Amino acid sequence: MPASQKSRVNFALHAPDANEVFIAGTFNDWDPQVRRLRCDKKGTWRTWMNLPAGQHEYRFIVNGDWQEDPQAGERAYNPFGTFNSVVSV
């Protein structure tokens, strides 16, 4: 894939009790307010992004608490003593 080409990546988190869910990562300078997810009727929060090829680290912010994506196939240790989720494009 050429470096300028991007691929659609879907993100989802089942959190029926959440009031709000955001996603932050290397693709948005870890800004916890940039990308809000939308909740479906079954309590799954979803969004998608067009991301360039490579590995992208991210975390969900659920009601203000940062957490890993339980569906992520990869994760990377971070400087806060926890893990970031990783998606490869």
Image (cartoon, helix red, strand yellow):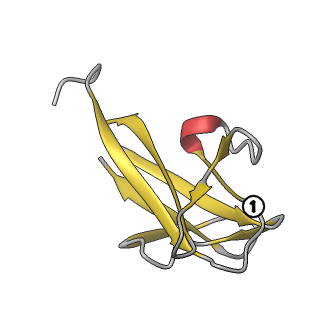
Comparing 59 with 3, the one in front is 59
Q: Position of residue 20 (x, y in %)?
A: 75, 61
Left or right of 63? Residue 79 is: left
Q: Position of residue 16 (x, y in %)?
A: 64, 79
Residue sitting at x 75%, y 48%: 32
Question: Label 1: few (<14), some or many (≥20) within 10 Å?
Answer: some
Q: Which residue is mark 1?
A: 20
Residue 53 appears anywhere in the view: no
Comparing 76 with 9, the one in front is 9
The quarter of the image holding the N terminus is top left
Quadrant in which residue 58 is drawn? bottom right
Left or right of 20? Residue 40 is: left
Left or right of 8? Residue 44 is: right
Comparing 38 with 57, the one in front is 38
Secondary structure at numbered mark 1: loop
Comparing 33 with 44, the one in front is 44
Q: Position of residue 35 (x, y in %)?
A: 64, 42
Residue sitting at x 72%, y 80%: 17
Quadrant in which residue 26 is drawn? top right
When the figure is inspected, residue 7 is found, relative to residue 71, above or below; the finding is: above
Residue 4 appears anywhere in the view: yes
Which residue type does callout 1 highlight?
A: Glu
Q: Position of residue 39 (x, y in %)?
A: 59, 61
Residue projecting furthest to the left:
1
Residue projecting furthest to the right:
64
Residue sitting at x 46%, y 49%: 56
